[in-house]
Amino acid sequence: MNILRSIKKNLSDPKKRSLTLLIIYILFFIFVFVVLNSSSNSSTNNDAETHTLSIFDNYKNMNSYQYKIIYTTNNTVDIVEGTYYNKTSLLKFNNNRYYLENDLLYIIDNDYYYLSSIQYNINKLLNTNFYNIISSAKEESSTTFTDGVKKTNYKVNSNEFYNYYFDLDSAYEGSIDISTTSKDNYITNISIDLTNLNIDLTNIQIEYSNINNINSLEFNKENLIYRE
């Protein structure tokens, strides 16, 4: 109240009126600046929180990477190595080169390419497809290590995985175990334990590297001749 009386007194004094008004204006603009700046910072923080993607969103949105898929059966270990870029993939298996596009697999034979197939459904393990399985998995446990690496264990319904990967109906009970290794909110390794299915294929392991750091496949299908 004393401050208000002092302000009123100064405003009524012609000698002090101008200085008092100037001080009032300065204080007013300082107040407005503080309020607007606080509001802007709050909005920025909210936007940052809103746009922080989950580990599964990052996995789905990976647009390029190198990968190694290790298939373990009761008798053999097969390895597929490839590069994924912009929904297409160039890969090697059993000393043959393949090109994968729109879920269709082509073998590259010198200057020709033609539709082919191998015993493994590689397209089902590309991130844009496998996202539907891994994102719906039930998390069982997770451990974060001192170097920032996080290992998470999941369970997936056996029927759901079998129907998805093999395109066959099944009547399996229970679940299969899937574990992921991640760092900086990106999945770098997936291990799929299939022993509960009692089939020849017992494990699938997928390793990712150079995530989002590849600019091309260094391959142009248009330079080859398609053969029926």
Image (spheres, grey):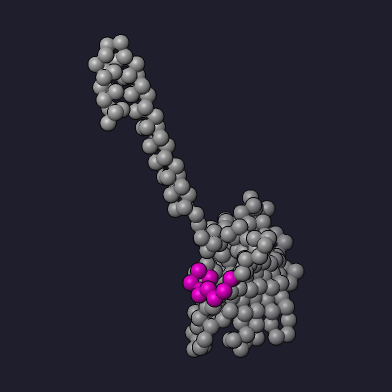
Please say whether residue 223 is visible from this viewpoint: no
Q: Position of residue 7 (x, y in %)?
A: 29, 23
Question: Which image quarter holds the C terminus?
Answer: bottom right
Q: Position of residue 77 (x, y in %)?
A: 73, 78
In the rendered image, which quarter is residue 70 located in? bottom right
Q: Position of 179 compared to 164: left or right?
A: right
Residue sticking out furthest to the front: 2
Question: Which image quarter holds the N terminus?
Answer: top left
Q: Position of residue 90 (x, y in %)?
A: 65, 61
**Residue at the image point whose x is 65% and y is 79% from the top:** 203
Q: Which residues fall within the magenta stretch?
A: 134-142
Residue sticking out furthest to the top: 15
The answer to whether residue 31 is above or below residue 142 is: above
Q: Position of 10 compared to 203: left or right?
A: left
Q: Position of residue 147 (x, y in %)?
A: 68, 60
The answer to whether residue 173 is above or below residue 4 is: below
In the rendered image, which quarter is residue 152 located in? bottom right
**Residue at the image point whose x is 39% and y is 41% from the top:** 39
Please say whether residue 61 is visible from this viewpoint: yes
**Residue at the image point whose x is 58% and y is 66% from the top:** 126
136 within the magenta span:
yes
185 within the magenta span:
no
Picture mark count: 0
**Most foreground residue, 10 or 194:** 10
The answer to whether residue 160 is above or below residue 48 is: below
Q: Position of 172 compared to 106: left or right?
A: left
**Most foreground residue, 206 or 38:** 38
**Most foreground residue, 181 or 123:** 181
**Most foreground residue, 150 or 66:** 150
**Residue at the image point whose x is 57% and y is 56% from the top:** 63
